Image (spheres, grey):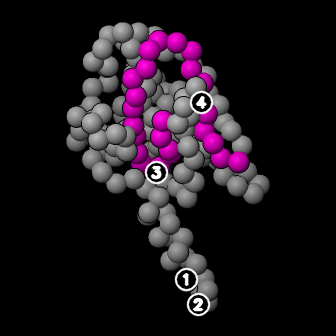
Amino acid sequence: MSGFSKVFGCILLFLVIMSCATGNKFSDLLPSTKPSNAEVGRIFFYKVSSFGTALRPEVLLNGEKIGEVAGYSFFYIDRPPGDYELTIRTDVDHKTSFVLDKGQTRFIRFSTSFGFFTGYVYGELVDEIQALSEIQNCVYTGAKTAAQ
């Protein structure tokens, strides 16, 4: 292996490690999956892989920035019932639409795919049983007060 390859490999490994989230795991925090206010719904966002962790796109909900995608991470927000459009910004916007009802909990998993020149991150709705089995080792990246 050439010197350039070793240096490139080390830089790539460093970027992957730095792109993964650090903090308290879902299984340690055990946040309530239900909102404390029955008039709103709760939405969990999570990513269970490090694939494409160099990409850290913004996450927008109805045009408002609510976070960014990081490997092995989760965050959640409470919102009033209604129609929502999730947009994940890379060089191409990927959108997911869904309806949130009062007291409902939604789970959106971030996944990465690669195009010809760049990677893309997209969100997909996941049922609660699957999401809760996947999210356990993800670390919390939301506001410090929201997880308490």
User: Do the numbered discs 1 and 2 sit on residues whose CB atoms are within 8 Å?
Assistant: yes
Q: Nearer the viewer, residue 39 or 22?
A: 39
Range of residues picked out in magenta? 66-91
Q: Marks 3 and 1, how far apart in space?
A: 23 Å
Tag 1 residue:
7
Residue 31 located left or right of residue 78? left
Q: Is residue 65 above or below residue 102?
A: below
Q: Which of marks 2 and 3 is nearer the N terminus?
A: 2
Which amino acid is tagged 3? Gly
Q: Quadrant of the C terminus?
A: top left
Tag 2 residue:
3
Magenta residues, dominant SS class: strand
Magenta run includes residue 135: no
| Tag in front: 4 or 1 | 4
Tag 4 residue:
63
Q: Earlier in the sequence, mark 3 or mark 1?
A: 1
Disc 2 secondary structure class: helix
Disc 4 secondary structure class: loop
Which residue shows up at 60% across the image and 82% down it?
A: 5
Residue found at the far right of this picture: 116
